Image: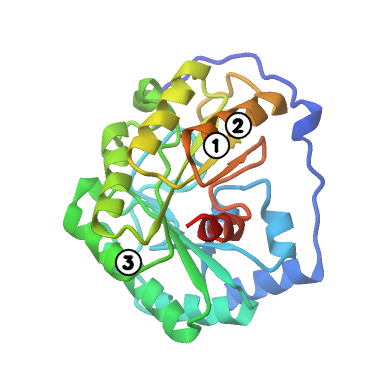
Amino acid sequence: MIFIKIKRMPKPEWLRIKARSTIDHKIVEEILDKFHLNTVCDEAACPNRGECFAKKTATFMILGNVCTRGCTFCNVSKGKPVPVDSDEPGNIAIAVASLGLKHAVITSVTRDDLPDGGSGHFAKVISEIKKEAQHITVEVLIPDFKGATEDLKKVINAKPDIINHNVETVPRLYSEVRPQANYHRSVDLLKKVKAMNKSIFTKSGIMLGLGETTDEILEVFKDLREANCDFLTVGQYLAPSSAHHPIVEYVHPDKFKMLREEAYEMGFLYVASGPFVRSSYMAEEALSHGKKQQ
């Protein structure tokens, strides 16, 4: 996809973040290297990775680090994926225990090349973590599995505490931002989770600054609530490079605050809305908040 070059906007003051490196940060990196594990923190160049690593937390990315889809916002490599690592579920479980995590977040690249989209591998990872330490809660951020209910059911049957699937942007921008995805399929996935297991919390997220309008954002919120989505994250899109979808707007923190209030009015159990918010940032807070409101 070819983008029209627009003048690069200077980053506003509220989006400046200090780099940090601590002993705990290095411990996380060492454990990841030891077990040959990937994190979305590194692959997606998340602005919060320094803070999260310093707290000994990370979002593990399974099924390799090469995605079969070509979303224009994402920094993860695209192309021919690597073979699935059968040792990965056990290694992640050991890494989670080694880090002393209370809440583990697992995501993946999209693997349209696999017969089940990688859903069986997700289920194995969840099972191994719970086997290693039953007290650990597990959140999975899953792809859409092309809408296949049987694949989704494999993940649901493994009983994670939260199933997250991000809509990412408003329907109008899907052809530019997520050309191989389908907005209604993504919303329907969240609806299916609740239909099959009401005890699992559902979660979704959207990026701002891609050219969406406020009315479009609020319509997405409504669609997610109609699908009984429990948790919502709203953050600023930051282009990884000039080859990615351009930033159309730096959204002011006041708007994020307004959107958070609107979302709570609609009935979400937990809403994180701010420039640096990402789908797995401070994820354990959402679960704790949701359980209190059950």
Kind of residue indicated by mark 2: Glu
**Left or right of 170, for residue 214:** right
Tag 1: Cα neighbours inside 10 Å, few (<14), some, or many (≥20)? some
Q: Residue 15, relative to residue 141: is it above or below?
A: above
**Left or right of 5, for residue 164:** left
- Residue identified by numbered label 3: 83
Q: Residue at x 75, y 22 (%)?
A: 10
- Location of residue 253 in the rendering, given as x and y in whole percent from the top left corner: 71, 28
Q: Residue 270, relative to residue 273: is it above or below?
A: below
Tag 3: Cα neighbours inside 10 Å, few (<14), some, or many (≥20)? few
Kind of residue indicated by mark 1: Tyr
- Label 1 to label 3, Cα distance in Å? 42 Å
- Location of residue 211 in the rendering, given as x and y in whole percent from the top left corner: 51, 18
- Label 3 to label 2, Cα distance in Å? 44 Å
Secondary structure under the numbered disc 1 in the rendered image:
helix
- Residue identified by numbered label 2: 261
Q: Is label 3 in contact with label 2 (beta carbons under 8 Å)?
A: no
**Left or right of 152, for residue 241:** right
Q: Which mark is residue 145?
A: none
Kind of residue indicated by mark 3: Pro
